[in-house]
Every structure is written in structure tokens, then in C-alpha cells.
Image (cartoon, rainbow, N blue to C red):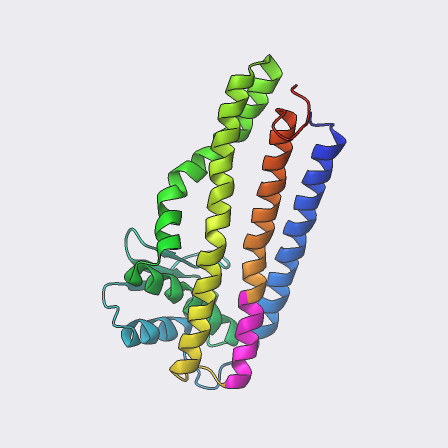
Amino acid sequence: MFLDPLYLLILAVGFVLSLGTQFWVKNRVNKWVKVPTSRGMTGRDIAQAILRAKGITNVTVEQTPGFLSDHYDPSSRTLRLSPDIYSGRSVTAAGIAAHEVGHAIQHKEGYWPMSIRQKMVPVANIGTNLGVWIMIAGLFIGLTGLAKIGVLLFAGFVGFTLVTLPVEFDASARAKRALADYNIVAPRELGGVSQVLSAAAATYVAAAVTAILQLLYWLYRLGFLGGRRD
């Protein structure tokens, strides 16, 4: 199986997509991290300003270690920003901080794709960690039923990657509107924000495409798509 040319092709496509999007993100981030915003607000200041403007008072903004480790934790209502974003005064910091606030706004407003995504987290973790190995084990020992269980689990992970796309795109759209509506960045700086957020969104698209290709391969291997049953 691991020497199957089709499987190797899928791995190669996934690798190229991942490498390409990572390069794009780093390129955009590094370009705009050197450009300060005209108002000089830090990422923390921007996050707190948008939260206040939206009437969100129960979300904490704190610093977290790592590079681009920024995220919003709905379980604790905590917005965590990496050091360069938390203390940064750049266009990159403004865009990423506002994007994470976009998730907090989604949470407050009950944005349904985000709610579904949160409910799918346990299934996605099981699907990506165990699904593939269950499929491999089922095919190796000739238990098609076991392999099908693995496919179902992995399909849950694929569904998670698909639901993630509208959540991320919507958060970026909210971020750009907030930055413009509250005059946090100048119009010329908003173009840089769009470049950074578009590059970041591409990583989720690449992950979804790769996951879909892998699922189609396993469905083919099990005979669901006209392929052979191994």
C-alpha cells in the first residue's frame, strides 16, 4: 500500500500544498510585520478595543508562547496571542489579532458553523489519530469491516476540515470589517491585512484538499469508488 503510486502521488500533492502555503504565510507575515500601523496599537490593544466595541466583556486576552500560535479558546473564553502579535504594532499583528477576535464574535453570536466545528473536535481527533491506522490494520489482516470503521472515523476528520473553512473565512471577514469600521488601521494598511489573512486561510484549504484526496483514496481501496477491495 505504501508503495502504491496513487498513494505516493496523494502524499506528494499534500506535501507540496503544505509547503507552498507555509511559504506563502511566512512571506506575507514577514513582509507586513515590518510595517507599523499608523495608530501604533499593539495586537492586545486592538483585540481589547474590538471586544469592547462589540460589547464582549467576558473574554480574556493573554499572551501565549510560540510562533503564530494565536487562537481563541471558546471553552475558557480566552483569546491567546503569540508574543509577536500580542505586543506587536504591525499590520500583521493587527490582522491576526482581529481575526482571533472574529472567532470570539462568532461565539457570542452563535455562529452555527463554529458550533458544529466545536462539537466535531473529539470526532476529528479520533479520526485523524486512529482512523488511518484502523484502515491499515483492517486491510492488512483482511477485515474489510474493520477498515470501513476506519474510513468512517477518518471521514469525521475530513468533515471537520470542511466545516473549518467557513469558520476561518468568516472570522477574517469580520476582522477586516472591524478594523475598517473602528478606524484601527488606515485603508492602505487594510490591503496588507487582507494579504496576511488570505495566506493564512490557504493553509486550511490545503489541509481540506489533502484530507479529501486521502479519503477518496481509501474509499477507492475499499471498493466504494469502483476500485479493488484489498
From this viewpoint, is residue 85 visible?
Answer: no
Name the one closer to the observer, 108 or 195: 108
Image quarter of the C terminus:
top right
Percent position of residue 126, x then y: 44, 33
Residue drawn at point x = 63 percent, y = 25 percent? 223
Residue drawn at point x = 29 percent, y = 51 percent? 75
Query: Which residues, given as a range, are shown in magenta?
Result: 187-197
Question: Measured along the vertical axis of the image, is residue 189 above or below residue 205?
Answer: below
- Tell me if residue 194 is in the magenta stretch: yes
* Residue 107, image quadrant: bottom left
- Tell me if residue 117 is in the magenta stretch: no
Residue drawn at point x = 56 percent, y = 24 percent? 135
Hey, which residue is sitting farthest left in the picture?
A: 58
Percent position of residue 190, x then y: 52, 79
Percent position of residue 73, x then y: 34, 54
Question: Measured along the vertical axis of the image, is residue 146 above or below residue 106?
Answer: above
Residue drawn at point x = 63 percent, y = 40 percent? 213
From this viewpoint, is residue 183 visible?
Answer: yes
Name the one closer to the observer, 146 or 185: 146
Question: Measured along the vertical axis of the image, is residue 132 above or below residue 67?
Answer: above
Position of 194 with respect to 103 (left or right) is right
Percent position of residue 194, x then y: 54, 72
Q: Main secondary structure of the magenta part?
A: helix
Question: Measured along the vertical axis of the image, is residue 32 above or below residue 21?
Answer: below
Image quarter of the N terminus:
top right
Hey, which residue is sitting farthest right in the picture?
A: 5
Name the one closer to the observer, 205 or 38: 205
Tell how many labels.
Answer: 0
